[in-house]
Amino acid sequence: MTAPADTTPGRELVCPDDELVVRYLLGALPATETECLDELSITDDAFVVRLRTVEQDLVDAYVKGELSGDTLARFRSRYLASPAQRQKVRFAQTMFGHPTAFRSR
């Protein structure tokens, strides 16, 4: 796994790997790593594009039934807590033809 992003002045930024980004999206990172990625999501356009891509892949995996264990539990409890994120899931369901993969709370 790539190290968390380091935003210390004078140090080169290390881009986090997809697994770390998924953990960020699901609220499973320590506060210090979350803060680094929060900052990247505001200051680094390339990271924003990557964040959106990883998020879409995560949603697609959920709709296809490919998530399991802690990732699935966190997706349901954290990601689906947001109306905007539930809308992303509904859109993916439409695209993949899985209207029953997600049930409203």
Image (cartoon, rainbow, N blue to C red):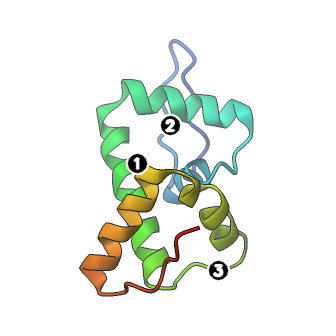
Q: Which tag, 3 or 1, sits closer to the chain's start?
A: 1
In which image quadrant can residue 87 be found? bottom left
**In the rendering, at what x and y percent does residue 25 appear?**
55, 51
> Label 2's element?
loop
**Gap between marks 3 and 1 measured at Cα:** 21 Å
Q: Name the kind of residue labelled 1 in the image.
A: Leu
What residue is shown with label 3? 68
> Label 3's element?
loop
In the displayed image of the protein, which residue is found farthest to the left? 95
What residue is shown with label 2? 14
Between 75 and 22, the one nearer to me in the picture:
75
Q: Which tag, 1 or 2, sits closer to the chain's start?
A: 2
Residue drawn at 39 percent across, 73 percent down: 60
Q: Name the kind of residue labelled 2 in the image.
A: Val
Q: Nearer the viewer, mark 3 or mark 1?
A: 3
Between 74 and 28, the one nearer to me in the picture:
74
**In the rendering, at what x and y percent does residue 65 appear?**
51, 85
> Label 1's element?
helix
What residue is shown with label 1? 51
Q: Name the kind of residue labelled 3 in the image.
A: Ser
Q: Quadrant of the C terminus?
A: bottom right
In the displayed image of the protein, which residue is found farthest to the front? 105
**In the rendering, at what x and y percent does residue 62 appear?**
49, 75
